Image (spheres, rainbow, N blue to C red):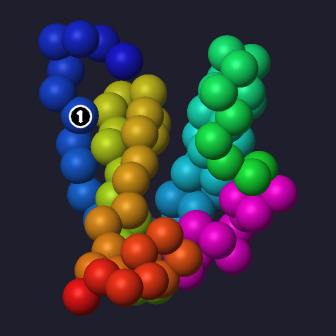
Amino acid sequence: MDSEEPPNVRVACSGDIDEVVRLMHDAAAWMSAKGTPAWDVARIDRTFAETFVLRSELLVASCSDGIVGCCTLSAEDPEFWPDAL
C-alpha cells in the first residue's frame, strides 16, 4: 500500500468474501510464525465471513492494491462477551 494513499473503509459486500478470507489466512499464518497464534484458521472460511457480510458487520479497508485490512463491528459477541448488553 502506498503510504500517500489513504485507505477507503467501507462495509464489505459478498464480492469481498474470498479476498477477506485470504487476508485473514495470511494474517493468521504471520501471527503463528511470530509465535502468537490467535485465530483458528479452520474456522475462517467463506461461511464465517459471509455471516458478518449479511449483517453488514464486516468492514474492509482497500486501496489500489485491493483489500488491505478488515474488521468486524458487532453490537454483541456471545462467544467472547456473553454477559455484555
Q: Quadrant of residue 62?
A: top left
Indicate the position of residue 33 as horizontal and vertical percent values: 74, 18
Of the 4 image quadrants, the one containing the N terminus is top left
Residue denoted by label 1: 7
Q: Quadrant of residue 56?
A: bottom left
The residue located at (41%, 39%) in the rendering is 69
Q: Main secondary structure of the magenta part?
A: helix
Does the segment drawn in magenta span residue 52?
Answer: yes
Per the image, label 1 sits on a secondary structure element best described as loop
Where is 39 relative to 3, above or below?
below
The residue located at (63%, 41%) in the rendering is 38
Position of 6 with respect to 15 (left or right) is left
Indicate the position of residue 6 as horizontal and vertical percent values: 17, 27
Where is 54 relative to 71, above or below?
below
The residue located at (69%, 76%) in the rendering is 47
> Is residue 22 visible in this depiction of the protein?
no
> Is residue 50 visible in this depiction of the protein?
yes
- Please report the bounds of the magenta region as a residue range: 42-53
Indicate the position of residue 81 as horizontal and vertical percent values: 41, 75
Does the segment drawn in magenta span residue 13?
Answer: no
Q: Which kind of residue does numbered mark 1 sit on?
A: Pro
Where is 51 relative to 20, above or below?
below
The residue located at (23%, 34%) in the rendering is 7
Where is 42 relative to 48, above or below?
above
Pick whichever, 15 or 51, lies toward us.
Answer: 51
Q: Report the residue that reaches farthest toward the front.
A: 83
Q: Quadrant of residue 66?
A: top left
Q: Report the residue that reaches farthest toward the right.
A: 42
Q: Report the residue that reaches farthest toward the top.
A: 3
Pick whichever, 76 or 83, lies toward us.
Answer: 83
Indicate the position of residue 46 as horizontal and vertical percent values: 70, 68
